[in-house]
Image (cartoon, grey):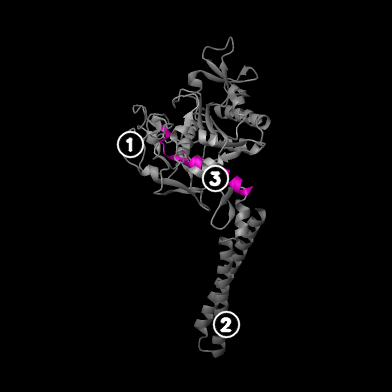
Amino acid sequence: MCEVMMTRSYWDLVSYYLKALCKKVHKFSKVLASNYSKSSHIQSFTAFLMFGSIICFLIVMGSSFFYMYPSPETLAEINQNRGININTSSDYDYCDVFDGKWVIDENYPLYNSSQCPFAERGFNCLANGRKDKDYLKWKWKPKNCEIPRFDARTALELLRGKRVVFVGDSLSRTQWESIICMLMSGVDDKNSVYEINGNAITKRIGHLSVRFGTYGLTIEFYRSVFLVQPGPAPRHSPKRVKTVLKLDQMDEISQEWVDSDILVFNSGHWWNSKKLFEMGWYFQIGGRIKFGMPINSAFKVALATWRSWVDNAVNPNMTRVFFRTFESTHWSSGSHQNCKVTTRPSLDTKGRERNSISDAIINAVKKASPAVNLLHVTPMTAFRNDAHVGSWSDNPSVPDCSHWCLPGVPDVWNELLFSFLLSSRNHS
């Protein structure tokens, strides 16, 4: 990377001096041509200088070309540490799949929520009265490659015999519902797909597990909004303390996540004062309540606990771990009262492409060992103020600019997840 930067600096310098030289030569030749145009010798000399000016121009243009369009080898070196190995039209190249844009694709959506028994009614915007359908037609297109088009049967074979676990808040449950509906489109016998305990898909259940009988595949969701362990307030705590969040202890149900083949985490939407302090939740470390501890600092401590758990509890030879960053919300004001859903993606992210929660997750993932895969969805979701539930939920009196309609944006998260899995299989 340093060599690439040095090469560019070199061409900057060369271009600068060549441009200056050519300007002086060209100016001098014009003066000669105007003052001595009647002399045949001077005319010849002027012609020579004019020819030299043209040569200088060609050299500058050539150097600019090499500056603006580096070789494929150079591009591969630049991108090697930014993305994943994606099957492109030319071969396997490294690509940052999170750097791209939303484009219309008439092949979307990938499924019909009304025909998927595992899609929660609250996320089925069309069934809840939404009239416009353009929000269903957008796909994510990385700048330098193509995400492999989702094929349900290929994905089912890829996951045959495996256990996939999603851990997190309601946004994790949305992704869990999305992946099940995506896969069900490739299942002939729909009755072979069932919730193991016969549970209905609702936000009130902390653990859901769907079995694809024909494929021996299980896809589970565990509700753990903070990832670390909540507990009762210690004795003699101030009255305002109702519950503590033990930042140095993983959620007690974490032992149930271990024996999985694919493990996908998310957290972030509950790390705010409304969900914590206003509800009487406070942070605890080493048995002591940390009054005055900022939420961002507490989140970083919780992520350090999560990272330590991954290091010690997860078998990297068995389990592939992912962490999804914060999904952008689009509330029109600071309070969660004003929610305006548009009909098209926004052209301006208004700063939502960056988030302190996501920054903390990115830093934690970088430090994790064994390696954890990052699903950095914050920038791409920043544009999608058209795809939220809004008032088209099972409770239209409560607006929602946090959750997403299904089908919709969570399907793209799963397409990216499958692109990582396919890339690993093809690479191996």
Q: Hey, what amino acid is under mark 2?
A: Phe
* Earlier residue among tags 1 and 3: 1
Q: Give the alpha-carbon distance from disc 2 to disc 3, as whole Å.
A: 59 Å
Image quadrant of residue 59? bottom right
Return the disc, 2 or 1, that comes first in the chain's sequence. 2
Does any portion of residue 97 appear in the rendered image? yes
Q: Relative to 428, is 172 above or below?
A: above
Residue 306 occupies quadrant: top right
Circle 1 sits on which residue? 130
Location of residue 134 with respect to 8 vertically, above or below = above
> The residue under label 3 is which amino acid type?
Ser
| Residue 422 belongs to the span the image colors magenta | yes
- Which residue is drawn at the image coordinates 54% and 45% (left, top)? 419
Q: Earlier in the sequence, mark 2 or mark 3?
A: 2
Q: What residue is rendered at 63% in x and 30% in y?
A: 304
| Residue 222 locus on image (x, y percent) | 53, 27
Kindly identify the residue that appears in the image at 57 percent across and 12 percent down: 237
**Mark 2 to mark 1: distance in Å?**
73 Å
Characterize the local packing of mark 2: few (<14), some (14-19) or many (20 or more) Cα atoms within 10 angstroms: few
Residue 90 image position (x, y, % from top left) = 56, 58
Q: Which residue is mark 2?
A: 48
- Magenta span of residues: 401-428
Disc 2 is placed on an element classified as helix
